[in-house]
Structure formats: C-alpha cells, structure tokens
Amino acid sequence: MTLAPDVTECEALLASIDTGRALPSDWYTDPALYRREVDRIHRRAWHYVTHVGELAEPGDQFLWQIAGVPIVLVRDRSGELRGFVNICRHRGHPVVMEAGNRKVLQCHYHGWSYNLDGGLLRAPRSQMEPEFDTSELGLVPVQTYVWGPMVWVNVDPGAPSFPEWIEGMPELMRERGCDVNEFVHAFEHTWAIDSNWKVCQDNTIQCYHCPTTHRDLCKAIVMDPREQILGIGGRYWIHHRIPFHDEYAARLTDKFVPGEPWFYYYNWIFPTTYLQHYGRGFDIGTLEVLGVDRMRFRHIVFLSPGTPEEELSAGHRRLVVDTTIQEDVEICGRVQQAHAAGIAPPGRLLPTSEFLVQHFQRLVVEMVAAR
Ligand code: FES
Ligand SMILES: [Fe+2]
C-alpha cells in the first residue's frame, strides 16, 4: 500500500475485505492516509456535536472542532440554529474564542463583526475601500441538524442531509420504543483514547469481543449470537437487538414482564457515533478525532426532563467508573500498539460474526477512494 492509495489499490483492498481480511496496519498508523480520511470521510460526514441546552437562547454561541475544522454554532435571532467555520474572513483568526451569549460574532484580531446569520456586519475602516463588498464576506456555513435534543453537524454543504444519512433509523427506534424527542441531556463523561478512530469503531460495532472482554456486560445481556439480531440499516447506519437476561431486566425496569424479552438496542451512525437505548432515555457514544492515533470519546446520557438531581449525580458517578467503557479504552490502546509495530499481516475477520466490521471497513475504503 502506498501512502495515498489509488482507486485500483482500493479495489484490491475491497476484494480482500470481502474475503474476510481486515484493513492493513498502515490504515491505522499512516499520517497521509489519515489526512485522506479527514478530507474524504470526516469532513463530509455527520457528527454529533452537542445538545440543544448549550444553544437555548438567541445569541448563544458554542465552539467545537470536527477533524481540525473549527466550528461555531449559533442560535440566531429568529431561533434558528446555524453553524459556521470559525475562521475570520479577514485574515483567519478564530472569530469566536469562547462560548457565551452575544448579539454579534466579533473577531478579536481587527474587530470585524458578523451577524448571527453569519453575514459580515462591520469591518473597521472598510468604508475607505471603494471595492469592499460585505455581501461576499460572510462566514462559511456548515450544515446543522437538530434531532430531538441533539445537534449534529456536517462540514460539507454538499453532503446528504442528516435525515437522508440515517433514513429509516428514527422510525426503527420509535418502533422499538425510543423517541429521542422525549429526552434531554442529563450528564456525560469524556475519555482520551490513544488509538486510531477506526480501532475504536472496529471494536464497538460488533459484540464478538464482549464475552471475553466485558464480564460485567455479560451479566446483563445475552451473549449467544443466535439470540441477537444485527443488521445494516442503510449505507451509513447499523443496528443491534440483544436481549437482557431476565433477572437483569427485572432490576432495570418495572415494565419488564416475565416471559417477554426485554432488549438492549444499539444503533451506530457512520463514522463516529453510536446511540443505544433500553427503556429509559438513550445514550450516545461519540468520537472526536484529533490525530492518526489520538481521539477523545464522549459518552452522553439523555433522560426524561425532571429526572431527580440525585439520580443524575449517581448516574454520572457510575459512568465515570464504567468498567465496559474502561475495558474498551484499554483494548483500543493495545490494538493500536500492535498496528504501530507494523509487522502483523492484515487480520482475519469472521464474516458471520463480524459482517458489520466488514461493512464499516468497506465504507472507509470506498470513501477514501472516492473523488
Ligand atoms: S482576522 Fe479577524 S478581523 Fe482580522
Ligand atoms: Fe466493547
């Protein structure tokens, strides 16, 4: 594999994924390939960014980054949520430097200011420039989508809309008893992970590793693959339905009826976010890609409005020491070290048990190869 694979090389790789070969190690360690992924995948895909509580009032401004692109989200005067690349059209300083509530977006460097809809409002001394046209100098917009309490962003204005990206998934979730509109942000925690983002996704999207890696999780959900239903919902999303053990379900919810299975549902949206639910609210797990072997993982819990404060703080305390997440964080670091050794041939996947990993790796290669 060269540093920048061409279409023929990608085709050969897709054929090898079809036969059960995993991606070669350089796909997890090569900085040039990572930059290609940033351009072709992360800057063209939908990512969870924050919850609507951070942008409740007109004038609220929230900062984030998506694969190196600084983003500012804004609630404008009419109540619409907008997103922009947070780079001043004058000479590139960040326009907004910290979250807050302001009437305009004003750049610290030379004082250019922008309306909340991104249009350039004022540039000091520009009245002395006969050719100066403010209408051409608005902030560069990004796509935003509010899904229930969540705010999703796609840096690429030409990318499919978020509803197209996850077409069919909200309906499936509703059929399975989860309407995201009923919940609000409750609490969250962040972990640093020293691995390539794909190591984490290879790990999370299939539970083949769960019986041996996650002893506590095994006490909750049924590991027999014959009891699990996994599927590809669309090009960019997948889903799982896994029964809880009855004893666990009885403790988890008073809606459990003996003799009727209670399910854990997991959905995953390419490339960085999963969304799981099992009867009370829902959780998100999302990656913030920082470099070829660096990222942050956030787990975010959404619950009914009015959940008592003690319940929220107890839930947060449990999340911080969650053994399943900690086990995954450690797994990812160790697998990354193995890839970094650069000596192992591509791994051998088990297509019956790991077809979702194959689907994910295929999609990565297809998008890297795309023009
Ligand atoms: S870089 Fe923003 S005003 Fe000059
Ligand atoms: Fe795991």
Image (cartoon, rainbow, N blue to C red):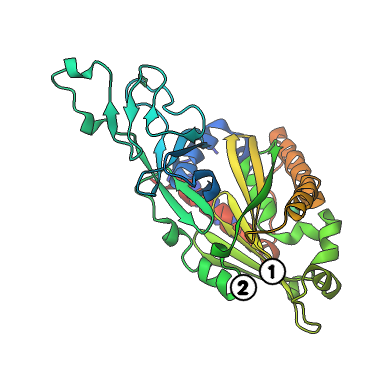
**Residue 110, above or below 350:** above
Badge 2 amino acid = Gly
For this orientation, the residue located farthest to the left is 130
Closer to us: 368 or 293: 293
Relative image position of residue 81 (x, y in whole percent): 41, 47
Height in image: 249 above or below 37?
Answer: below
Q: In the image, which disc is placed on residue 279?
A: 1
Label placed on residue 348: none
Query: Residue beneath label 2, please?
Result: 177
Q: What is the secondary structure assignment of the residue under circle 2?
A: loop
Looking at the rendered structure, the secondary structure element under dot 1 is loop
Depicted 3 relative to depicted 160: above or below: above
Residue 15 screen position, x and y as percent: 54, 56
Res. 334 image quadrant: top right
- Please indicate whether residue 198 sits to the left or right of residue 138 in the image: right
Residues at marks 1 and 2 touching, judged by CB atoms closer than 8 Å:
yes
The amino acid pointed to by label 1 is Gly
The x, y position of residue 171, in whole percent, is 51, 71
| Number of other residues with Cα within 10 Å of mark 2, as a class: few under 14, some 14 to 19, many 20 or more | some
Name the residue at 77% across, 77% down. Answer: 256
Q: Residue at x 52, y 67 (%)?
A: 170
Of marks 1 and 2, which one's residue comes earlier in the chain? Answer: 2
Judge whether residue 264 can be spotted in this image. Answer: yes
Q: Is residue 303 left or right of residue 15?
A: right
